[in-house]
Image (tube, helix red, strand yellow):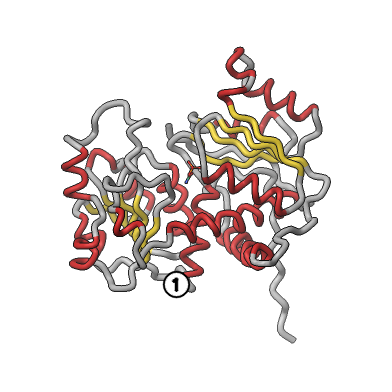
Amino acid sequence: MMKEKKKHTWRHKDLLGIENLSEEDLVLILDQATGFKEVLARPIPKVPTLRGKTIVTLFCEPSTRTRASFDLAAKRLSADTLNIAASSSSFLKGESLKDTARNLEAMKIDMIIMRHECAGAPHFLAGEVNAAVINAGDGFHEHPTQALLDIYTIREKLGKFKGVKVSIIGDIAHSRVARSNILALSKLGAEVTVCGPKTLIPAEMEKMGVRVVYGLKDALEGADVINVLRIQLERQKKALFPSTREYINLFGITKEKLDRHAKEDVVIMHPGPVNRGVEITQEVADSRYSVILDQVTNGVAVRMAVLFLMGHNKNLEQKEVPTKLHN
Ligand code: CP
C-alpha cells in the first residue's frame, strides 16, 4: 500500500522573513491563499475564522498597500483590528518600541504587524513579546508578504515556478522587496536575474545565486516576468546615479523597449508605489502586460492566509533570529 504524504503544517510563531521559510511553508501559504481568494469573490467576503483574535498594525514608516491589505485581511477573517501609526503615537514622546509593544500586549492582543525603518526591528520585538509578530517591511532587509503575494501572482499567471525566468530591475541595493523575492523564487526553483546601475546592485547578489546583468536588454530578453522596482531616493544617503533622466533612458521600462526585447506574453509586475514616467511609463503600467493591480488584489488573500496560519498555530517552534541582517 502506498504511504500517504504527511500534510505540511505551519510551525512558526512569527513571520519575520522568507529566509526562515521552507519551500513547503511557501506552498502551504499559496494554497491557503487560493481558498481565501475564493472567499473574497463571494457576495459577503467574510469568514469567522479569527473571531476573538485582536490584530494590531504598528507602522513606523508610510504605507498604503501593506497596511490597508493587512487591515482588510484581518477584518475579512473577523478579527478585531487596531491601527497605530508612529506619527500619532507615544513614540513621539520618547516611548521605546519594547514598551509600546508590551503595553499593547497588556491589552491582550494576539498579533503585531510591524513596519520599521530599521532592519531587525520586528526580530527584536518577536523576542520581547508573546504575541505573533509579522514583518511588514524592515529597512533594506525583508518584506515577506510582498514576496508572497508576488509569487502567488506568478503562480496564478504562469502555473509554475520551476524554470520560470524572473528579472528584477531597478534599485536592488535598497529593496527589501528584491531580497524577499530572490529568496522565495530561488527556494521554488525559478531563475532570477537582477539588473540595474552597478551602484544599485550589492556585491552579495551573486552569492545569493542570481544572475546579475547591467544592461536592460539582457534582463528583458527571455524573461517570463519582469518585476520593476522604484528608485528609493528616501533610502539613498548619496546620489548613486548621475541623473533621473539617465536612469530613465537606461533602465526605464517603456513599450518600445518591451516590443524590441521582451517576450510577447511577458508579465510586468511592480510592488508599488509606482513612480510613473521614471522606472515605468504610464503606458506600460496600464498595459495588457501589467498585473500590478492583480498583485494588490492577491495581497489580501495572501495576508489572510498568513494571519489564518499564524492564528491557528498549535505547533510552535522556538523564536527565530535571522543569521544576518542588512541595513
Ligand atoms: N508595496 C508596498 O509595500 O507598498 P506600501 O509601501 O504602500 O505598503
Q: Nearer the viewer, residue 323 or 179?
A: 179
Give the residue at the far top of this rendering.
93
Q: Would you identify the image quadrant in which residue 2 lies?
A: bottom right
| Horizontal side of residue 280 vs 111, given as left or right | left
**In percent of the image, x 75 and y 35: which residue is there?**
130
| Horizontal side of residue 234 vs 29, given as left or right | left
Q: Quadrant of the N terminus?
A: bottom right
**Cβ(mark 1) to ligand 1 < 8 Å?**
no
**In percent of the image, x 70 and y 44: which residue is there?**
13
Can see residue 110?
yes
Task: State the image coordinates of residue 69 (x, y, percent, origin top left).
Answer: 59, 48
Neighbor class of circle 1 (other Cα within 10 Å; few <14, some 14-19, many 20+) is few
Q: Nearer the viewer, residue 280 or 33?
A: 280
Task: State the image coordinates of residue 269 (x, y, percent, origin top left).
Answer: 39, 58
Can see residue 204?
no
Q: Which residue is mark 1?
A: 158
Amino acid type, label 1: Leu
**In percent of the image, x 64 and y 44: which residue is there?**
71
Q: How many marks?
A: 1
**In percent of the image, x 34 and y 44: which residue is there?**
275
Task: State the image coordinates of residue 146 (x, y, percent, origin top left).
Answer: 50, 50
Q: Quadrant of the C terminus?
A: top left
Give the residue at the far bottom of this rendering.
1
Give the residue at the far front of this rendering.
43
Task: State the image coordinates of residue 132 (x, y, percent, origin top left).
Answer: 70, 40
| Disc 1 secondary structure class | helix
In the image, residue 258 above or below residue 240 = below
Q: Nearer the viewer, residue 7 or 30?
A: 30
In the image, residue 287 above or below residue 79 = below
